[in-house]
């Protein structure tokens, strides 16, 4: 039963995604709504989204597009999206599609507003044509369509108000770091196919970020400063450069897909690439690399199942906790060292806030990659943050619970304030033009 559970978890939480998953989810909702009112021109499209969705969709790059923003990506999904593609809905779109979406926006037919809901992941799209209306709601999970209405009639409604509680917590109930570590050691190669694919896809976008010019060029800047001798040519620099470069490319709108972890492509990058970079430096076998990345993925999924999809805290911190465990495995550590590395990372980066998806996310990815390496090296040397410090417990599972409680219960007001500050800045910029 445990083996089946973990295989199901990997299948559910490792999903190929093209572009930042929040604007992608908006496009998916709009494309789905449009599919029910085809044949007539769109007279109006209205989007309402939770504050966390707005934070992550307002400024991030859209794959292959010059334009960005909430109204644009909603229009893009409506005019050109194929909902069957799910998180790859933006794959194959053209400049002509971009122009059609911009035309809809410029005609004033697309509007967006904040949805005042307790849900952190909530998207509501309403489309009106001459003769028909449609409405689609996505909630709790980036692909979880919880409501479809056509001409005011409910066509589909999810059976549970909180899809996350059934889809995640039920599946993950009872899973522990001990079970994860044991499974990774014994897993058959065919159970690790998705993990292998995550290495291939995410390494490709990491190399793209190192070779091209994207966003803040965080990865390239680290690499160049290693060459100059300003930074050490060590495990930490290698992990930071490759992981940050992947985020550079993705946040700037690269057309390369990534393997997301727990609904986030940046988390997928931060889970895999620090481990890949360290493995390449250590010249370990392919099998050991795949098992290390599997461990990193599963630790992160385990933490995120309690932490939630979106929060006022940066989700890449959880990915850093997973990556630290994977790096420990590469360095020859056992279960206790893996637990120590997670404890060390929790005690290091827990307070990092999320102020939306944008180019600067690559710096946070590099920070967490560095923390993962440092935490792993400390653990291998039998150094572990003690329960006398902060909210760390002797039991790693209790430390994880405390971290997740901080993200879920302690940051509601912080979340609201972050969005307020972001919107105030936008208003100030408009006023100065």
Image (tube, grey):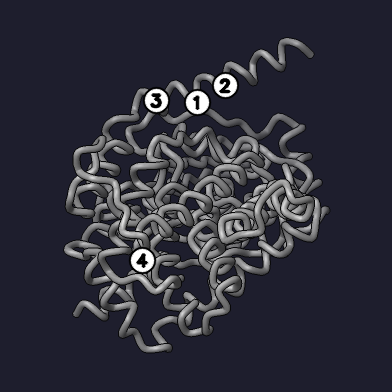
Residue 112 drawn at (x, y percent): 57, 31
The C terminus appears in which quarter of the rendering? top right
Task: Tell me: 25 left or right of 44.
Answer: left
Residue occupying the point 63% across, 68% down: 203
State which mark lies toward you, 2 or 4.
4
Residues at discs 4 and 1 in contact (Cβ within 8 Å): no
Query: In the image, residue 409 lies at what x, y percent?
Result: 26, 33
Which residue, given by chain and number where applicable, does mark 3 sit on?
414
Question: 172 and 286: which one is in front?
Answer: 286
Left or right of residue 139: residue 19: right
For marks 2 and 4, the one nearer the N-term is: 4
The numbered mark at residue 214 is none
- Horizontal and vertical percent position of residue 235: 57, 61
The alpha-carbon separation of the residues under discs 3 and 2 comes to 14 Å
Mark 3: few/some/many CA within 10 Å (<14, 14-19, 20+): some
Is any atom of residue 83 visible in this view? no
**From the viewer's perspective, is residue 6 above or below residue 363?**
below
Element at label 2: helix
Which residue is denoted by mark 1 in the rendering? 419
Q: Residue at x 52, y 78 (%)?
A: 196
Label 2–label 1 contact, CB within 8 A: yes
């Amino acid at each position: 039963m445990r083996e089946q559970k973990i295989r199901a978890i990997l299948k559910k939480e490792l999903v190929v995604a093209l572009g930042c998953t929040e604007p992608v989810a908006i496009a998916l909702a709009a494309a789905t709504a449009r599919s029910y009112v085809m044949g007539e021109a769109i007279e109006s499209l209205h989007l309402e989204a939770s504050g966390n969705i707005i934070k992550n969709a307002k400024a991030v790059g859209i794959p292959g597009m010059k334009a960005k923003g909430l109204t644009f990506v909603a229009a893009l999904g409506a005019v050109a999206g194929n909902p069957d593609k799910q998180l790859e809905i933006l794959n194959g779109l053209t400049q002509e599609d971009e122009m059609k979406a911009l035309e809809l926006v410029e005609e004033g037919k697309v509007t967006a507003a904040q949805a005042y809901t307790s849900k952190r992941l909530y998207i509501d799209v309403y489309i009106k044509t001459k003769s028909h209306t449609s409405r689609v709601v996505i909630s709790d999970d980036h692909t979880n369509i919880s409501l479809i209405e056509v001409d005011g009639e409910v066509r589909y409604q999810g059976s549970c108000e909180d899809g996350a509680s059934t889809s995640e917590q039920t599946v993950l109930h009872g899973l522990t770091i001990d079970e994860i570590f044991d499974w990774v050691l014994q897993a058959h190669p065919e159970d690790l196919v998705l993990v292998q694919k995550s290495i291939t896809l995410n390494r490709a976008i990491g190399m793209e970020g190192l070779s091209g010019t994207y966003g803040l060029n965080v990865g390239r800047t680290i690499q160049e400063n290693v060459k100059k001798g300003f930074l050490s040519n060590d495990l930490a620099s290698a992990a930071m450069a490759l992981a940050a470069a992947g985020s550079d490319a993705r946040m700037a709108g690269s057309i390369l897909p990534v393997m997301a972890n727990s609904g986030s492509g940046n988390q997928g990058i931060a889970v895999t690439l620090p481990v890949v970079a360290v493995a390449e430096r250590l010249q370990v076998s392919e099998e050991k690399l795949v098992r290390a990345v599997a461990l990193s993925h599963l630790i992160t999924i385990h933490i995120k199942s309690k932490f939630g999809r979106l929060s006022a805290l940066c989700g890449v911190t959880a990915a850093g906790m997973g990556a630290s465990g994977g790096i420990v495995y590469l360095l020859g550590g056992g279960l206790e060292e893996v637990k120590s590395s997670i404890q060390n990372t929790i005690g290091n980066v827990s307070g990092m806030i999320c102020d939306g998806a944008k180019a600067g996310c690559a710096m946070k990815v590099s920070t967490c990659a560095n923390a993962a390496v440092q935490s792993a090296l400390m653990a291998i040397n039998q150094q572990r943050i003690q329960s006398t410090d902060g909210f760390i417990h002797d039991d790693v599972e209790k430390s994880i619970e405390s971290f997740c409680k901080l993200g879920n219960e302690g940051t509601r007001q912080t979340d609201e304030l972050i969005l307020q500050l972001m919107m105030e800045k936008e208003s100030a910029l408009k006023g100065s033009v």
